[in-house]
Image: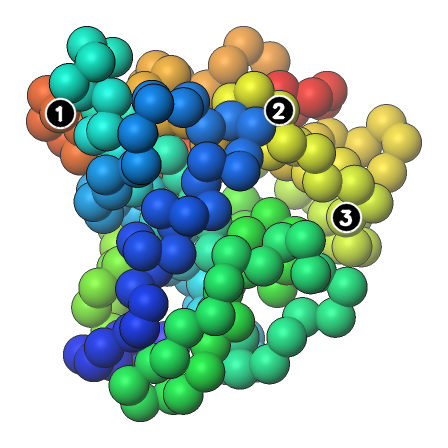
Amino acid sequence: MSVIHKTTMAPTKVELLAAWLPTRSWYTATGGAPELERTGGFRLDDPEDEVGIEFLVVTDSSGTAAGSGPRGYLVPMTYRAAPLAGAEDALIGTSEHGVLGTRWLYDGTHDPVLVGQLAALLRGKAEPQMQSVSHTPDPSVTAVLDGTVADGTWAADPAVSVTDGADATHIAFGAGDPVLCLCRVMGGGAQPPAGALGAVTAEWRSGDGARREPFAVVLPATC
């Protein structure tokens, strides 16, 4: 299981995301620099114990003064000891970890380790972990998957395309296969969309308290 080191990162994940988020199609510009805080998420373990995997929710409060209010965003992230070949466009940034040294941080939708473990979680083959505590499962995270998908070969091969939309990132594995969608903009509702074949549901904190809603859904077509 992953170990959470109580140490420093320079720059921090939040600092890196403040520069990266405004470059995303699903981010809503507020007219000012993002004002971010961590407001939820969970982790998954890499079976090879090489790649850190985190599903991080950050809330941007920069639009509050303009009347648009805070907005939550989901960023699946991976942390690597060396660059991921072919994923230059998915690099969020690099950071100096106080224990592990230089870490390359990636948008995890483009990292096959994160995508594979998310599919394993949906199949019941991986256990979600607490975001900030080592060796501790997070029972608040739930995952369900339709048996017709779980019993097949869905997501066994690498993704063939990763596409950002207005509020989600769509991961396709092949023609006619169900699509794995990461729900980037939080606050869309407590239930998966109609027709969903599966979902991972977790908690985050919004301005009006704790919420549970889908972080990822499996659909027979794009989100």
Q: Which is more foreground, mark 3 or mark 2?
A: 2
Q: Quadrant of residue 62?
A: top left
What residue is drawn where x is 40% and y is 24%? Answer: 29
Secondary structure of the residue carrying tag 3 is: loop
Can you say which quadrant of the picture contains the C terminus? top right
Residue 12 image point, x, y percent: 30, 64
User: Label 2: which residue?
Assistant: 165
Tell me the amino acid under the disc marked 2.
Answer: Gly
Residue 72 image-quadrant placement: top left
**Quarter of the rendering occupied by the N terminus:** bottom left
Find residue 30 and report its horizontal and vertical position in percent: 33, 22
**In the displayed structure, does residue 124 sit left or right of residue 208?**
right
The residue indicated by pointer 3 is 159
Residue 65 image offset from top left, x and y in percent: 15, 18
Q: How is the image coloured?
A: rainbow
Residue 167 drawn above or below residue 194: below
Circle 1 residues within 10 Å: few <14, some 14–19, many ≥20: few
What's the distance in space between the residues labelled 3 and 1, CA to CA?
35 Å
Query: Residue 28's x, y, as percent?
Result: 42, 22
Query: Disc number at residue 207?
Result: 1
* Depth order, front residue of 136/40: 40
Amino acid type of the residue tagged 1 in the rendering: Gly
